[in-house]
Image (cartoon, rainbow, N blue to C red):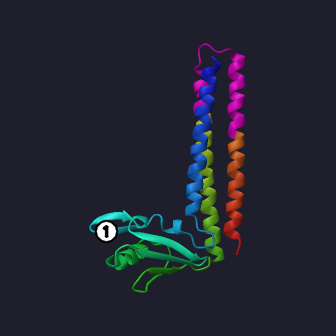
Amino acid sequence: MNEEITFILESAKESMDAAMKHLEKEFIKIRAGKANPSMLSNVKVDYYGTQTPLSQVANVNTPDGRTISVQPWEKGMLQEIEKAIMNANLGFNPMNNGDMVIINVPPLTEERRRELAKHAKAEAEDAKVGVRSARQDANKEIKNLDDASDDLKKNAEADVQELTDQYTKKIDVFLENKEAEIMKV
């Protein structure tokens, strides 16, 4: 019997971990002042008629905190890469020096910082919804157990709630850190 409850708790924990991992990925995409190659992770380049991720046609590096350099593997791709970055609508103005595309990352305005902080809050709330959904699923499974005593079910539900509280706290701390990073000038 305890095996079933242990399995339910483990699957709830896995779902909550997945929500945290997704939040981490989304937070990486949110720009926080300094240049990062992941800022261009959503850029798709027209590579001989196929929409291909930028990372598969070029090296993307950050030589310093304000610059992103994109070195294509084929020189003929320079214009395509430049066009793709412009079309991605990221607010960047790429420059082509004949060898590579260089992007100067402008400092964030106060208004843009607030927008990004709001976006981070929304992503954190989505992660919390994922955690609560995992809790709800686990509680349903626990209630549907036939051969478990009421006390065992109550204890398992308390364990699920404790797990939920832990992950909610983690998300809050993660959001606090991200907001501080975004708002730091």
Residue under the point 69% across and 70% down: 183
Residue under the point 63% across and 30% down: 9
Residue 75 as seen in the image, left or right of residue 124: left
79 shown above or below 38: below
Residue 153 as seen in the image, left or right of residue 86: right
Q: Is residue 144 magenta?
A: yes
Residue 97 as seen in the image, left or right of residue 80: right
Where residue 11 sits, quadrant-wise, is top right
Residue 14 position within the rendered picture, expressed as x and y whole percent measured from the top left = 58, 38
Residue closest to the far front: 73
Query: Which image quarter holds the N terminus?
Result: top right
129 shown above or below 100: above
Residue range of the region highlighted in magenta in the rendering: 136-164
Query: Which image quarter holds the C terminus?
Result: bottom right
Where residue 62 sits, quadrant-wise, is bottom right
Residue closest to the far left: 49
> Dot 1 corresponds to which residue?
47
Specify the amino acid type for callout 1.
Tyr
Give 82 or 126, whichever is nearer the viewer.
Answer: 82
Mark 1 Cα within 10 Å, few/some/many (few <14, many 20+)? Answer: some
Q: Under tag 1, what secondary structure?
A: strand
